[in-house]
Image (cartoon, rainbow, N blue to C red):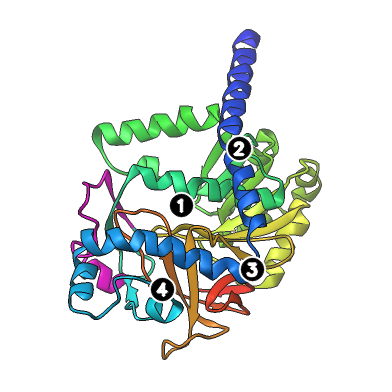
């Protein structure tokens, strides 16, 4: 038994080392990139990057090909005024016209379905190559809190391995029960947030000794509240951070309470199924937009640029479903911009 445990720990260390090695150079490259461009140069970089993609999009995506042929939008994006002529699209429109909004240059590798929290779930095509562009963003952002890919993570999240049927469900269960522990991840279902289950989650955190915790923001608050009496045990873990996702905290005091119970920084991811990670809080208190891959706008109800209001996203890497001035349905405030490109903001509201 002892020998078996030692082998398990050894395998975990090797896998953690390999995972860290594979992403470390990409995180360093991300850091160097973001440090190499001043805030006032961001929009120029983004328009150049978008224009490179735009030449292929207007050929391979039927919706935009028709707009260009009809002269409704320019074939070359030379300025912000040119970019501003592109139409604003939302999830409802995209759901109705997904075939016209998909890139026909090659077949999709998968179809992804968004969650139904907005009442308008969207099924859209995806290429495997897309992850090569957005995955380094995740670890670059977590590095704000000194989190490494090799760190042990406890995740309070949905348990999708219990969904589906047949072989697909079996593969998911193997991945979750064997694969995740092998890379130092422990996932606890957030489908049942009863006090009893949350006490069990608290015990597992203490025994698992993670370096950081990620979960639905409101679930994390409930976790902290039910396990507040274990504050000393949690703080002895020396966690790097607790990261909320999928939603904001209801009150600033919720975030402060979680920080007090776990004895560490508390941050927030801002992401959607369509965009993946779009922005991430920094210990300085702001959301930092991952603007290398995302051009973010903030507009008012009339569609005019604003310091706070509706958020639009344009992705700056090749996608089977290109997002161009795509409205997520959220509001952001206290934005900092390079002309009309948002590179940081204070708050997001669903």
Callout in the foreground (4, 1):
4
Q: Is residue 225 visible?
A: no
Q: Is residue 11 left or right of residue 325?
A: right
Which sits earlier in the primary sequence, circle 4 or circle 2?
Answer: 2
In this rendering, would 336 be left or right of 61? right
Instruction: Provide the residue designation for mark 1.
Output: 191
CA distance separating discs 4 and 1: 49 Å
- Is 102 one of the magenta-colored residues? yes
Q: Secondary structure at mark 2?
A: helix
Q: Secondary structure at mark 3?
A: helix
Q: Quadrant of the N terminus?
A: top right
Compare residues 276 and 72 and report the one nearer the observer. 72
Which residue does the image show at 44% across and 69% down from the upper left? 313
Q: Quadrant of residue 2?
A: top right
Kindly report which numbered mark, 1 or 3, lies closer to the viewer in this rendering: 3
Q: Say whether marks 2 and 3 touch (CB < 8 Å).
A: no
Q: Is residue 341 visible?
A: yes
In the orientation shown, which residue stands out farthest toward the bottom?
Answer: 302
Secondary structure under tag 1 reads: loop
* Residue 25 marker: 2
On screen, residue 344 above or below 309: above
The mark found on residue 78 in the picture is 4
Whole-Å distance between the Cαs marked 4 and 2?
A: 33 Å
Q: Are marks 1 and 3 in contact (CB under 8 Å)?
A: no
> Mark 2 Cα within 10 Å, few/some/many (few <14, many 20+)?
few
Circle 3 residue = 39
Q: Earlier in the sequence, mark 1 or mark 3?
A: 3
Residue 169, position as x, y percentages in the image: 31, 36
Query: In which quarter of the view is residue 150 placed?
Result: top right
Q: Which residues are magenta?
A: 91-113
- Residue density around tag 4, few if under 14, some if 14–19, many if 20 or more, within 10 Å: few
- The first of marks 4 and 1 along the sequence is 4
């Amino acid at each position: 038994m002892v020998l078996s445990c030692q082998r398990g720990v050894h395998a975990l260390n090797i896998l953690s080392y390999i995972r860290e090695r594979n992403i470390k150079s990409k995180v360093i490259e991300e850091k160097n990139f973001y440090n190499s461009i001043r805030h006032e140069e961001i929009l120029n970089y983004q328009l150049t990057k978008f224009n490179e993609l735009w030449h292929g999009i207007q050929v391979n995506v039927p919706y935009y090909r028709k707009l260009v042929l009809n002269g409704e939008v320019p074939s070359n994006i030379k300025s912000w005024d040119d970019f501003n002529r592109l139409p604003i699209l939302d999830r409802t429109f995209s759901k109705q016209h997904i075939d016209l909004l998909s890139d026909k240059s090659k077949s999709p590798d998968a179809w992804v379905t968004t969650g139904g929290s907005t009442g308008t779930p969207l099924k859209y095509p995806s290429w495997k190559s897309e992850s090569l562009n957005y995955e380094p963003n995740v670890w670059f952002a977590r590095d704000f809190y000194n989190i490494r890919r090799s760190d042990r993570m406890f995740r309070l999240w949905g348990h999708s391995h219990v969904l589906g049927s047949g072989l697909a469900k079996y593969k998911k269960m193997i991945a979750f029960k064997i694969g995740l522990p092998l890379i130092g991840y422990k996932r606890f279902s957030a489908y049942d947030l009863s006090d009893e289950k949350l006490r069990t989650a608290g015990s597992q955190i203490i025994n698992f000794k993670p370096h950081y915790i990620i979960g639905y923001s409101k679930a994390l608050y409930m976790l902290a509240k039910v396990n507040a009496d274990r504050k000393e045990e949690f703080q002895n873990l020396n966690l790097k951070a607790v990261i909320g996702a999928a939603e904001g905290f209801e009150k600033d005091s919720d975030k402060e309470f979680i920080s007090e119970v776990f004895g560490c920084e508390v941050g927030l991811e801002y992401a959607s199924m369509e965009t993946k990670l779009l922005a991430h809080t920094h210990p300085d208190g702001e959301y930092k937009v991952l603007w290398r891959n995302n051009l973010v706008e903030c507009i008012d109800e009339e569609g005019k640029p604003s310091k706070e209001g509706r958020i639009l996203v344009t992705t700056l890497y090749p996608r089977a479903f290109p997002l161009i001035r795509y409205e997520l349905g959220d509001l952001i405030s206290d934005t900092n911009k390079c002309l009309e490109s948002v590179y940081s903001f204070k708050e997001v509201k669903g």
